[in-house]
Image (tube, rainbow, N blue to C red):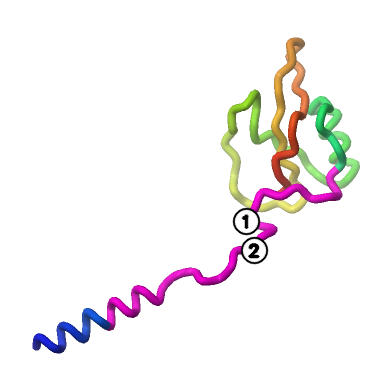
Amino acid sequence: MRSLTLVLVMALSLGISACGDDDEPDSAASQNTVASDVPDIVGESVDDATASLEEAGLTLRVVRRDGEDLAATADFVEERVNVAVETQDDGSELVTEVVSTG
């Protein structure tokens, strides 16, 4: 009985240790990257940046406002550009950084 228990524990330990994700993550989807075909929108107002991106077939999403990260979904949308904005004295928002695409 004792040897059967030992064999069972060893088999379960081996089975559990074999579980895991050995695959390398897809570098494009797992890293925050900025695609080279994104128009330069840094310094533009959110409205102007949105228009520039739409002309290029892309969409804008604000993920950081005035230095604070905003809630955002983790889904990958190839045409989406995530940006950081800063609110100006007149209340308008300027794009300060292209954070990532997707």
The residue labelled by disc 1 is: 30
Q: Residue at the far top: name it.
A: 90
Whether residue 14 sits left or right of residue 89 in the image: it is left
Residue 57 percent coordinates (x, y): 86, 47
Q: Start and end of the magenta stretch?
A: 11-38
| Left or right of 99 on screen, residue 8 | left
Residue 8 place in picture, x, y as percent:
22, 83
Instruction: Please provide percent x and percent y for residue 5.
Output: 15, 83
At 44% across and 70% down in the image, what residue appears? 20
Instruction: Identify the disc placed on residue 100.
Output: none
User: Residue drawn at (28%, 83%), measured in percent from left and top?
Assistant: 11
Depicted 96 relative to depicted 32: above or below: above
Q: Are marks 2 and 1 in contact (CB under 8 Å)?
A: yes
Disc 2 to disc 1, how far (Cα)?
Answer: 6 Å
Question: Disc 2 marks which amino acid?
Answer: Asp
Residue picked out by circle 2: 26
The vertical placement of 27 against 97, above or below, is: below
Question: Image point 28% across, 78% down: which residue?
Answer: 12
